[in-house]
Image (spheres, rainbow, N blue to C red):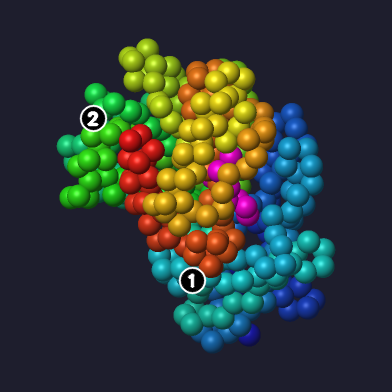
Amino acid sequence: MAFRYLNTGFENASPLDWEIGDNGAIQIALIYDHERESPNRAVLHWHFMLEADPGDTLRLELRNFDNIWNGRPGSPIGDETPCVVSEDGRNWRTAIGRKVEGNRLELFVSLVADHLYVARIEPYRISDLERFLERIRRNELVRIEPVGTTVEGRELSIVSVGRLDAPHHVLLRGRAHPWETGGNWVIQGLIDGLLAADAGSALDAYCLHVLPMANKDGVARGMSRFNLRGCDLNRNWERPADPMLAPENRALEVWIERMISAGQRPDLVIDLHNDNGGQLHANCPEEGAELYQANMVRLEEVLRRFTWFREGRVSPNFRNPGSLGEGLCDRYGIDACILELKCLATEGLGRPPLGADWHRFGRGMRQALTAYFA
Ligand SMILES: [Zn+2]
């Protein structure tokens, strides 16, 4: 074996430490990110490049999966944990890792070139978003409005597609958690669908607004969950966001309040995430629970009808205090929910999704949302 180097010198690569173990495996210690004033910590993202000889098979052992979520221990890896590999960082294929003793992830990879990218799920980088926005920017149906900046000063924009006098407004947020790239592919698929030649009737029904990448700093730095000040951008929505600690949430909140003042209150907000379960997390608002639950049943039904979503809805009594779904329901009376996109094999596909699958999911959401508002 002529293993030469583990390269993390590129966009969205994970912070990590590595060494060659006594057993010959490349031992990779991922670095947790931590939540402020909380025991919570997370390693959920891995993205690096191996340099070795073509024809080599390398054994990798990844560690530091002793995550703490909502104050409880929880490992993100299981007996079969799908990863993705690619020679060019564009065309990815699935490689299955497995959990071994010590809560480590073992993965065997074979090189056909002198390098191989390895990641948890198909990456979607800031440069991918910028390339996409450049492609749609001049379309007359698209508006891109700067609404604030991240902790490190990266620009946050709301991308709107359609007419502001449309009868309904939908808001989607992606990438509150940096490792969760599925939402970006869904957003791109939905916007591509709305801008396709046959999309006229959808934009008569609703105007789409998107904050595509809330936690840009975390994406840039290859982090897992929190922002640069240790805030979880899907928590603390029960009260106004602290503009110093979570400017990403403050920017979105100010935009929502401005829409409400202008008589354009979002009728539906979907916060896009990834996890191992893939369910629609409706919640239990303090007021108007019956109408809200009926709307969530309808949302689940149209997602099943027009996309490959099959994982269903969690119990109507589910609560996840402080999530964007609960906060927007309780503070603004908006129908808001969390849509988790499953990163393990899904029922609708029979295998773990890649970026193109989530893009197709997004295209299906165009009709799903039309049907939802019909
Ligand atoms: Zn998430």
Disc 2 residue type (three-letter): Arg
In which image quadrant can residue 76 be found? bottom right
Which numbered disc flags the more N-terminal residue, 2 or 1? 1
Q: Residue at x 51, y 36 (%)?
A: 296
Disc 2 within 8 angstroms of ligand 1 (CB): no
For the record, the magenta segment spans 272-281
Mark 1 residue type: Arg
| On-image quarter of the N terminus | bottom right
Q: Nearer the viewer, mark 2 or mark 1?
A: 2
Which SS class for mark 1? strand
Residue 175 at x, y = what percent?
Answer: 50, 42
Residue 143 highlighted magenta (yes or no): no
Q: Residue 163's mark?
A: 2
On screen, 105 above or below 224? below
Residue at the spot x=65%, y=65% of the render? 81
Is residue 96 shown to the viewer in this render? yes
